[in-house]
Image: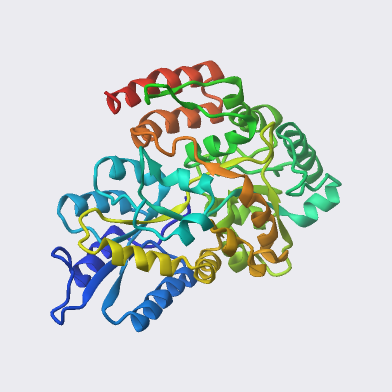
């Protein structure tokens, strides 16, 4: 996940200044809603604040106070505010962070609160990311595929086939291309740099293209982990690029996405797999004259399918003004407003009408490639799995890191993910 700029202290201060607890109503009898946003890029913060201002101007009896939150600390901050009865009315988060809050009774079921317009505009696969049990606990509104950011000149000079959204590289072709690029570039340079400081979501989400699922829900509703040959394709490709082919940089395995950009700009790496929103950093930081392009991630038997965890808007179960909060969410996610939010965050809207906006289909900065991939996005494999955060932190992250570095083989990786992983999940499903 992208580096976040705001600290937990700033979040706490914002909550303190805005006021916590109580029913939020003002002395003049007007309804006061608190909207905690996790927007952090200036364009995104500006878009959110402008929409709040527009709502307040047209809804004098229902006023919304903007509260700045932080991706770095949102889970713990929300848990504390829920337990203390001080949660904001409208909550910005990501779908993969909602399961425990939804099952814990902290979030309102939105099934009967949202207008039909909004329900129909967002595709079913997106709603699946916020559906837990029989209820819907968030509105998915922004999403981003993982793409390949590539040095256009290096690809051209090497003579490799440039993939398109309609004809992406297979994983086998991708591996061969990175070998060809490495040979073309010369000693000390690499066809690919994998920044895998947080390897789990990258591995699982890209694994959907090969049929990997890892998490399987039985007839009794319980989830177990199975590591099949399909689950091994993506991690096996990365491991071989690093340890067999020498076409991927070992030094970036523990790095974040932003950490790999200087080497990319300097010509050390021909390509870097990054979230779609990283394009903003590249526009801002790329040296003058540096030519880059956006390519689709490799595809497998399932095509360019890819898992995502969309950004979401939810309503606190304790909010005394759920219907007004739902009306504000509907306003925020009108098609033209969803486009504004998507452009501000350099991401894609989930809404069908918003996704069709011409501004999101231009070749400039790779918008068209992302828009073409949107219909292939699916819920992340662990989307609704209780205990996933613990499994990810304690089991999967160290196991994948050791596998990618070459310290363990695929048999040991499978053993850890499955045996240790199922022990963790079992505690959450008794």
Could you tell me which residue is drawn at 39 percent across and 24 percent down? 421
Q: 393 above or below 289?
A: above
Residue 342 visible within the image: yes
**Image: 224 above or below 4:** above
Q: Give the residue at x 65% y 38%.
A: 248
> What kind of colouring is applied to the model shown?
rainbow
Front one among 263 and 225: 225
Residue nearer the viewer, 328 or 389: 328
* Quarter location, residue 394: top left
Judge left or right: residue 353 versus residue 104. Answer: right
Q: Quadrant of the C terminus?
A: top left
Q: Is residue 93 above or below residue 168?
A: below
Q: Quadrant of residue 188?
A: top right
Residue 105 location in percent, x, y?
Answer: 24, 44
Total of numbered circles in the picture?
0
Q: Position of residue 395 (x, y in %)?
A: 39, 28
103 over 37 or under it: above or below: above
Q: Where does residue 160 sit, x and y in percent of width and height?
A: 83, 44
* Residue at position x 36%, y 40% in the image: 134
Percent coordinates x, y for residue 288 in the rendering: 69, 70
Using the rendered image of the protein, determine whether residue 269 is visible from the camera's viewpoint.
no
Is 190 left or right of 335, judged from the image as shown? Answer: right
397 and 222: which is toward the camera? 222
- Of 394 and 299, the residue lying toward us: 299
Residue at figure coordinates x 71%, y 30% from the top left: 245
């Amino acid at each position: 996940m992208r580096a976040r700029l705001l600290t937990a202290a700033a979040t706490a201060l914002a909550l303190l200044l805005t006021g916590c607890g109580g029913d939020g109503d003002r002395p003049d009898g007007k309804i006061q809603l608190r909207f905690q946003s996790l927007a952090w890029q200036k364009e995104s913060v500006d878009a959110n604040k402008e929409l709040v201002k527009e709502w307040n101007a047209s809804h004098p009896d229902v006023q919304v106070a903007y509260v700045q939150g932080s991706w770095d600390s949102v889970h713990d901050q929300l848990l504390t505010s829920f337990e203390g009865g001080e949660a904001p009315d409208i909550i910005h988060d990501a779908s993969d962070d909602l399961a425990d809050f939804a099952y814990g009774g902290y979030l309102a079921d939105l099934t009967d609160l949202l207008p039909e317009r909004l329900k129909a505009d967002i595709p079913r696969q997106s709603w699946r990311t916020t559906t837990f049990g029989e209820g819907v606990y968030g509105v998915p509104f922004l999403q981003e595929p993982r793409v390949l950011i590539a040095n256009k000149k290096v690809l051209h000079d090497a003579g490799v086939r440039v993939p398109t959204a309609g004809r992406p590289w297979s994983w086998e072709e991708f591996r061969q291309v990175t070998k060809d690029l490495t040979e073309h570039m010369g000693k000390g340079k690499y066809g690919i740099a994998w920044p895998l400081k947080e390897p789990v979501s990258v591995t699982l989400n890209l694994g959907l293209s090969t049929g990997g699922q890892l998490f399987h829900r039985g007839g009794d509703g319980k989830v177990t982990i199975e590591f099949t040959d399909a689950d091994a394709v993506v991690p096996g490709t990365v491991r071989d690029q690093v340890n067999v082919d020498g076409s991927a940089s070992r030094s970036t395995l523990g790095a974040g996405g932003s950490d790999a950009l200087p080497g990319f700009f300097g010509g050390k790496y021909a390509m870097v797999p990054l979230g779609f929103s990283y394009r903003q950093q590249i526009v801002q930081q790329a040296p003058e004259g540096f030519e880059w392009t956006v390519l689709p991630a490799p595809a497998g038997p399932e095509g360019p399918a890819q898992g995502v965890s969309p950004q979401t808007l939810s309503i606190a179960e304790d909010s005394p003004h759920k219907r007004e909060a739902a009306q504000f969410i509907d306003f925020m996610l009108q098609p033209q407003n969803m486009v504004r939010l998507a452009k501000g965050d350099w991401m894609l809207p989930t809404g069908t009408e918003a996704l069709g906006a011409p501004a999101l289909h231009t070749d400039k900065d790779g918008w068209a490639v992302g828009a073409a991939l949107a219909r292939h996005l699916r819920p992340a494999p662990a989307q609704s799995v209780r205990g996933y955060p613990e499994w990810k932190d304690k089991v999967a992250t160290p196991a994948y890191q050791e596998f990618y570095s070459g310290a363990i083989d695929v048999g040991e990786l499978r053993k850890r993910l499955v045996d240790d992983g199922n022990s963790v999940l079992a505690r959450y499903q008794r």
